[in-house]
Image (tube, helix red, strand yellow):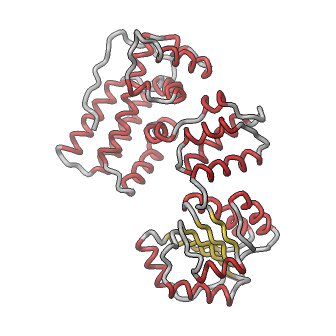
Amino acid sequence: MPIFTPLQIGKLVDLAKQNRIAPIYLFIGPLEISLEKAKLIYKILLEKGASLEIYDLREKEQKRDFQQTKGYQEGLFGSRKLYLLIGAEDLSPAKSEEILKSLKKGASVFSWFILAERFDENHPLYKFASEKGAIIPLGLKKKEDLLEGELITRLKQFNLTLDKRTADLFIDLVGKDFYHFLQELDKLILYCLEDGVITQEKLMEIVVPLEEQALYLIGELLFTRGPERTGSFVQHLLDLKKEPTEILGYLYRFFKKLALLEDLLKDHPELEREENYAQFMKLWQELKEDTLRELPKLLTESHPYAIFTAKRYLKRIKNIDRIFELFLQAEIELKVTFREPKRVLQDLIFHLWREIQKGTQQTQSYPQTQRKVIGSPP
């Protein structure tokens, strides 16, 4: 098997379905893209009864475990055994030799998926892959070019088309995070599936930019998936060493944006009543361009779709002032009494959820007095 370009991954998948399986697949380039591409192949093999072991060599414990592994065993009842190595740039010569021995002795029962952002062409595993395996270079182009290629490939699968300017706009909006790119692309495909074509207008209606998604993700989870899923996500952020005050700040700004929007809608009920996004976006743009009205920056810097969806969340809040009292209490617990951050955030999420549950799905009337937001951004 020779070198395969990103657009030729489908050929490797088809070969795997036909039981033409390489003993080694070497992916070179951005790890998040490499992992998604590798998954397309090894999930076919798992469906055929193979077993999989994963080692992320960027993690100290997993790297240690892999270094201590001696010999590689075939799967039960002679099934194929798959090894997935993530972050394999610095494989030691000794481990590389062990892998080569397993490949040479058990090419029919082993397959190695080796993922690295860079890999020396003189490396023994590279040479073996060039002769008897498959090399998939994903880092020879700019990230934007890789995303554009992925965009074209996915759209072809659904018989969807778009022009170059629309493709560029999509990539500009979603940024370079591959998982966010896939999430927004899947959403866009479903939205435009019946039309057969993706226009800039449709794109702007549905796609949420990466920065906006990062700000809204925690708040949206609370409204759409409930406190348990939100709590799990917050715990994940803490595990990633995100500062508790930063997480608190994300949530604070989410609800502050809702408060600012509520005050704005009382002056512009036409925005609150508009249920058609295209018309809402037109009204919103006219309001932003009105030189006689200065809108809060937190609203103007938001994507119109985020503002449009935020109206739904407002209908589920009965007393938004109480929301900010909860934030003030959480800030005091973090910064003054030094309570355990995990407990502070868990309790905050629980109490926010209770306030949301007290709300009503019916359209609220908006008070005529301006609200003072209690507390300061963490």
Q: Position of residue 5 (x, y in %)?
A: 70, 62
| In the depicted structure, whether residue 133 falls above or below residue 320 | below
Left or right: 306 in relation to 147? left
Quarter the N terminus occupies = bottom right
Q: Who's the residue at 38% across and 25% down the image?
A: 297
| In the depicted structure, whether residue 300 falls above or below residue 46 | above
Residue found at the very far left of the displayed protein:
336
> Looking at the rendering, which quadrant does residue 266 occupy?
top left
Q: Who's the residue at 33% across and 44% down the image?
A: 246
What is the number of callouts on the image?
A: 0
Q: Position of residue 319 (x, y in %)?
A: 36, 23
Q: Who's the residue at 45% across and 24% down the image?
A: 314
Q: Nearer the viewer, residue 200 or 15?
A: 200
Left or right: 46 in relation to 17? left
> Looking at the rendering, which quadrant does residue 258 occupy?
top left
Q: Nearer the viewer, residue 285 or 58?
A: 285
> Looking at the rendering, which quadrant does residue 349 occupy?
top left
Left or right: 264 in relation to 202? left
Quarter the C terminus occupies = top left
Q: Nearer the viewer, residue 125 or 347?
A: 125
Q: Position of residue 331 (x, y in %)?
A: 25, 39
| In the depicted structure, whether residue 229 falls above or below residue 321 | below
Q: Who's the residue at 31% across and 48% down the image?
A: 244
Q: Position of residue 48 (x, y in %)?
A: 75, 70
| In the depicted structure, whether residue 371 falls above or below residue 121 | above
